[in-house]
Image (cartoon, rainbow, N blue to C red):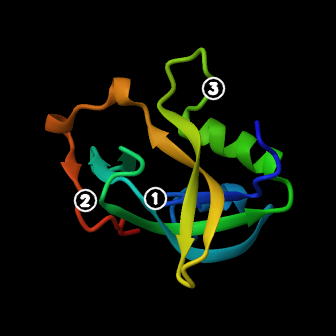
Amino acid sequence: MNTKVKYIFVYGTLQVGGRLSHNHDALRGLVRKACIKGDMYNIADAYPAVINIGSDNTVHGELHEYSDIKEALRIADRIEGCYGDDFNNLYNRVLVHAKLESGDLVQAWVYVYNNDKFSKQDYKQIKEGVWVL
């Protein structure tokens, strides 16, 4: 795990005000609007999923900074069902470049839906790339 990267890009229920954001309240520092390239889908009207990192579509969210990234990732891994490379995870954690409103790129962790669990016919794409809290 690259612990030099101290950011997590969030786009759904972990955004500030989202139903799971309280899990990081004690650890979260600076929060800034950002975006990444990927495709966003609505999973059973409960939460969003991003797939196809690097596609032409834009996913809007927040870049969260953490002083204790190891603890923040431990908590997020549990929430996102990410147990390691040898497991059938719900989400996989990957490094991406998030683009800030200033245009600067920042390396960040993001949780990407496991392609083995994804079925385009079962989920509706959110073409505008914004999960409404």
**SS at mark 3 in the image:** loop
Evaluate if marks 3 and 1 touch, with contact meaning CB atoms under 8 Å apart.
no
Q: Are marks 2 and 3 in contact (CB under 8 Å)?
A: no
In the image, residue 122 above or below residue 130:
above
Label 2 belongs to which residue? 126
The mark that comes first in sequence, 3 or 1, is 1
7 sits to left or right of 117 = right
Q: Is residue 63 above or below residue 40?
A: below
First in sequence: mark 1 vs mark 2: 1
Residue type at mark 1 is Gly
Residue at the right extreme, as displayed: 67
Name the amino acid, label 3.
Tyr
Residue 30 placement (x, y as % from top left):
73, 75
* Residue at the disc numbered 1: 12
Tell me, yes or no, if residue 27 can be seen here: yes
Q: CA distance from mark 3 to mark 1?
A: 20 Å
Horizontal side, residue 118 vs residue 83: left or right: left
- Against 110, is 99 above or below? below
Q: Position of residue 133 (x, y in %)?
A: 41, 68
Give the residue drawn at x 36%, y 64%.
58
Does residue 42 appear to the left or right of 73 in the view shown? left
Mark 2, other Cα within 10 Å: few <14 / some 14–19 / many ≥20:
some
Residue occupied by mark 3: 83
Name of the residue lying farthest toward the bottom: 102
Q: Quadrant of the N terminus?
A: top right
Instruction: Tell me the CA gap for discs 1 and 2.
Output: 12 Å
Q: Quadrant of residue 120?
A: top left
Of 22 and 118, the residue lying toward us: 118
